[in-house]
Image (cartoon, coloured by chain):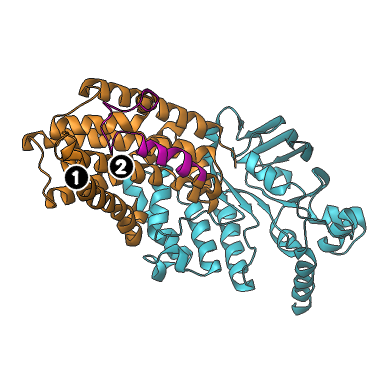
Amino acid sequence: MNGKFSNPPMISVRNLVKNYGNSQALRGISFQVQRGEIFAFLGPNGAGKTTAIKILTTLLRPTAGRVEIDGLDVTIDQHAVRERLGIIFQDSSLDDQLTVLENMLYHAVLYDVPRRLRGPRIEALIEVFGLGEYRHKQVRRLSGGLKRRVEVARALIHNPKTLFLDEPTIGLDPQSRNYLWAQVKQLNEREDVTVFLTTHYMEEAERFAHRIAILDQGNIIAQGTAKDLNMQTHSDTLEDSFIALTGREIRSEDNGMIDRMRQLSQLGKRK
Amino acid sequence: MKRYIRSAPRMFGTLGQPLLFFLALGFGFGPVFQRAGEGKYLEFLAPGVVGMTILFAGVFTGSELIWDRQFGFLKETLVAPVPRLTIMVGRTLGGTLLATIQGTIVMLACFLTGFRPVRWDHLPRALVFMVIIALMFTALGTVVASLVKDFQGFQVIINFLVMPMFMLSGALYPLTDIPDVLQVIAKANPLAYGVDGLRGILVARTYFGQLVDLIVMGVITAALLLFGTYQFNKIQI
């Protein structure tokens, strides 16, 4: 496994702490993501996943600790860091009232994609993500799955070195989920894009991520490949390991967890 | 920008109010104003109403930032490798264009009702003034929107900032004979300078002097743009 990745790491986080007032969202987490790796962050709701992503993508400032992307400090070289990232947020960040094409063009301009490359690249992505017939539709008229596809397509226009996906498949049907992951995997294999993702679907993490970190109450409580984690907890599936590690009790902030678990077990049965 | 053109009802809404002011107040107060020896009220009021249109349009478009924040689109802009000054200036210029267009439409409407500037060849200068007023208030709207997070906060701003600014600006009445307190307030009011400058050009009647108007507005605008950039640098989501 290690032979495939060359140093230095794409993402390097050391003792990252983030406080909101009195509450601690992150209590000093450390991890590294190698170039070309797919790295998954798992954890119950409120564990700090989104906070971590926001810090890694320069949207939030850390309280303490050091975060480097491609060797650049996210609090100092913000501009250079931003150039390297493609981000898909948990909630939509499309402009509802613009069309698919306009959203993508806007992104291309923001990321300073050379004018002559804009058209071809956008067209290619529209093709790949099957958005051809929706090109001139306003985003607010699209279904949730289509919006998600637009966001992923948009994030790729500027050929990012690292792709951040914060629960990208939430609310998508199995077809759309598979489709999305297939595209991400392809991107990772062909273009060597580093992928950092969070998800609640254990099965997704197990299938696609090279390495996994489990976050709970602001701490990383386990890290490694899915196999490592299963061995460590003497479990057969990642879901069992996850529950073994984070406990059975439902987090106060989270009522959707049971539903998701139920969905998951159904997914398992179908196979 | 493109969004705005698509929301036609809003366009109508923002134009309707100043026109209502112009017609109702203009014709309603006209006789009183004349009897007081101040000349034609319509002439006096027209620049004020144009200024008012730009004030409202500018602050509103500036405040679109709140929408963008609530619907997540702001994140897309903030994670992009774009200098924060560019974001601030870009947003402001977009709003400026819209506010100026609206101001122009209202001015044309004033012409329709019989308003005539003293010199037609000074219209381009009036346009310059309108652009600066628009720039100033769009920047103001953006700055304020970067400070508040939701629409409740925005309502407060409209009530405590925009409305008083309009009422106390000298858009509706001359500043010359008002009580001292009001004069002091007017001198601290950016719109007062905008309206005064416009009035100077259109009906050759000014209180501060056009040069003062220009300088004051220029300084305020620059300060707002810088402060807005600072805010954008600090913004966290």
Q: Nearer the viewer, residue B86 or B22?
A: B22
Chain (cyan) = A
Q: Residue drawn 26% across and 20% down?
A: B212
Q: Is residue A206 magenta?
A: no
Badge 2 density bin: few <14, some 14–19, many ≥20, Cα 10 Å: many
Is residue A83 in sight in this rendering?
no
Q: Residue drawn 42% across and 54% down?
A: A104
Chain (orange) = B
Q: Residue drawn 55% across and 49% down?
A: B152
Question: Where B59 sits versus A156, above or below?
Answer: above
Q: Which residues are magenta?
A: B156-182
Q: Which residue is mark 2?
A: B52
Q: Amino acid at mark 1?
A: Gly
- Where is residue A235 drawn, in percent x and y? 90, 61
User: Given the image, what chain letter belongs to the residue carrying mark 2?
Assistant: B
- Where is residue B136 drawn, in percent x and y? 34, 33
C-alpha gap between disc 2 and disc 1: 19 Å
Q: Which residue is mark 1?
A: B30
Could you tell which of marks 2 and 1 lies nearer the N-terminus? 1
